Image: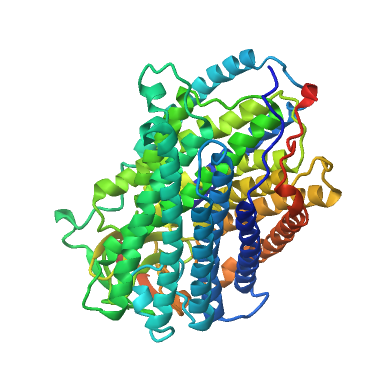
Amino acid sequence: MQDTAWFISLTLMGLLLAVFVFVWSQSSVREEDFTPLQKRAYRLRARLFWALVLTLGPAMLYNLIDLPYAAADARERDAQVIDAVGHQWYWQLSRNEVRAGEPVLFRVTSADVNHGFGVYDTGSRLVAQTQAMPGYTNVLRHTFAQPGKYRVLCLEYCGLVHHNMIAEIDVVEARGAAKE
Amino acid sequence: MAAQETTIDRGAHPAVLAYLCIAMLVLLLMMVFGALMRMEQAEFIAMGPMWFYELMTLHGAGMVGVAGIAGIAILWHFLGQYVRLSAPVFVANLVLFVAGVAMILAAVLGGNFHGGWTFLHPLPSKSMGTWSPNAAALFLGGMLVIGTGFLLLHLDIARAILAREGGFGRALGWPQLFGRAETAPPPPTIVAATMATIVNLIGIVAGAAILSMMLVNLYFPDFGVDALLAKNLIYFFGHVFINATIYMAVIAVYEILPRYTQRPWKANRVFLASWTASTVLVLFIYPHHLLMDFAMPKWMLVMGHVVGYLNTFPILVVTAYGGLMLVYRSGIRWDMASGLLFVSLFGWSAGVMPAFIDGTIPVNYVMHNTLWVPGHFHTYLLLGMMTMVFGFLYYIGKSAREMRERLVDRAAFAVFVVATLGFTLSFLSSGRSGAARRYAVHLPEWVPYDRIASVFAVLVVAAVAVFATRFLLRLPAASVDAPRATLAGSMT
C-alpha cells in the first residue's frame, strides 16, 4: 500500500510539474486576444473536470469497500485476543505471542494520554494501526501472514519518551504449518 | 485585451509591513528549529529528547502562527482596497499575537512545556512531572490570546464585508451563482476573504472552547473533558485555521498575476461555485485527521475520506487551472514576484496529491502519523502558502527604480524550489518506509532519509534568509504607491 501511495503521488505530482513547465515554456509570447484562448481553456477545463470525476470517483468508492473498522463479529469468536493498554511510556499487552494465519483482535485503550498503536513487521513496515485513547477501546483486527518478531510503536505523541515506547509480539507458525 | 485601468500598485500600510517583518523573523527562527530537529534525527547533532520536543512544540505553534499572520496581512492589504477596515483592530491582533508568542515561549523555554502544538487532551495535564500545570496553562493561554486576536480581526473583516455586500451570501456571489442577478459579482478578493472569515470565525470559536475547557481541567481535574470530543474540537480548529491561511494568501495570486499578465481573473460562476464549495468542504473535512480513531461514528470517517477527494477539485480545476490559463501565452515578464506566485500554485496543487491519498482510509491505516504527513503539508504550506507570501514580499518591496532583481535573488529562488522539493520528498519517502513522525530518536533504518532531508533543510533556510533579508532591505519602498508589476510583453 505504501509503495502504491508513493508511486501514485509521484506520478500525479510529476504530471502537474510537466503541465506547469509546459505553460511556463509557452509564456514568453503573447496571444493578444484573450477571449478565444479563454474559450478554448474553458472547454479543456470541462474535460479535465470530467476526467477527474471519472478517475477519482471510482478510486474514492473502491477504497471504501474494505474498511478497517470492523469490530469482532460472530465468525471471529475464536480469534486470538490481545488487550493492549498504552501507558506513559510503555505498552501493557495481555499476551505477546500469537499464531500466524489466524485473525488477532487487539482491544486497544490507554490508561493516561493518547497513544497510537502501530504494528510494524519484521522489515519495519507499518502494517496496521489504531489510536489508543483514554475512555475508549478501539478494536483492531489483523491477521499476521508471516511468523516473526513484530514491533508495536507509539504513533501518537505522548511526551518525553514517546519514541521509546516499543513492545514486541512473537508471531509463531500457523497451526497447520507447525504440524507439517 | 485592453490594459487594466491602472498600473500603480498601492503601497503597504505600516501595520501590514509590521506583520510581515514579524512573520519573516519568526519564520526564520522556526525554520532553524525545524532544521535542527531533522539534524537531531539524522544524528548530526545531539540535543536530547527534551530539547527536541520543546523545539517541535515551538516549531508547530510558531509556524501555524506565522502562516496566520502572513496570510491575514495579505488579505488585509488587498481587501482594504474594496472595504473599510479598522487599522486599530488590525494592530490589536498583532499586539495580541506577540503577547501570545511571548507566553508560549515562556511556557516552553522557561517551563519546559513540550506537549506539541496540537496539545491533545489530556497530555498537557499529564506530563509525568516534566512540566508543571502552570507551564501548560501558559501555553494554552498563549494560544487562546492569539486566537482571540484573530477572532476580533475576523469580526472586523466580517463587519466591513457585510457593510459593502449586505450579507455573506452576496459576498460569496450567490445571487450571480444561484440566481439571475445581472449585477457584477464581487471581486475574487472579497469572495476569498469572506470564505476565510466564515470558516475561521467558526474554527476559532471551537478552538477557544476546547482551550478554555482544558485550562479549567488543568486546575480542577474533576471538571472532566472527553478525550475524543477534545480531539474533534482541536482538529476542527487546527485544520480550519491552517487551511484558511492558504485561502487568505492566495488572494496575492488573484490580485498580482492579473497585473503581470494584463488579463483579468474573473469571478465567474465556476469560480463562485468553487469558493462556496471550499467554504463547506473546509468545515467538513477535518475527520480525515481521526481516521484511526475507530470509536468515531463511521459516517464521519467516511465523510472525511469523501470530502478529501472532493476538496481537490476547487484547488486543481479552478485556482491552479485559472493561474495557468492566465499565464499561458501571456508574454508575462518573469521576475521574483511573478515567479514565486506561479511556483506557489504548483506547490499548493502538488501538495494536495499526497494529502488526499493520505486521507484515503486504507492508506491512512498504514501511513497515519508517519513522516508522510509532514511530507504533504510542507509541500502545500512551504512551497504553496509561504511561497505566495514570498511572492507578495518581492512584489510589495519593489520600487519603481528597481524593476529587476539581482543574481542573489534568482539564485535563492532556484535553491529554494529545488531544496524544498528535495526536503518534502525526503519526508514523503521516509513516510513510505514507515518512519514515525514526532520522534526525537529514529530507528537506524530511517536515519539515511533524515540525513538527506537535513541537507535540503539547511538550503531551504539559506534561501528564505535571502528572501527575508531582501525584503527588509527594501522596506522603505514597500509603503509607496508605485507601479510594481512588470507588464506583459506587448503592453510595455
Image position of B112 with respect to B330: above or below: below
The residue sitting at 40% across, 73% down in the picture is A158
Scheme by which the image is coloured: rainbow
Q: Residue A149 versus residue B104: which sits nearer the camera?
A: B104
Q: Residue A120 versus residue B162: which sits nearer the camera?
A: B162
The residue sitting at 72% across, 45% down in the picture is B480
| Relative side of B299 to B139, left or right | left
Looking at the image, which residue sits at the far left? A74
The residue sitting at 52% across, 45% down in the picture is B248
* Residue A98 x %, y %: 30, 69
| Relative side of B282 to B263, left or right | left
The residue sitting at 63% across, 43% down in the picture is B344
Question: Based on the displayed image, in which of its 4 quarters is residue B398 positioned?
Answer: top right
* Residue B215 x %, y %: 33, 73
Whether residue A22 appears in this view of the structure is: no
* Residue B116 x %, y %: 46, 69
* Residue A151 x %, y %: 42, 71
- How many numbered marks, from 0 up? 0
Image position of B135 with respect to B310: above or below: below
Whether residue B36 appears in this view of the structure is: yes
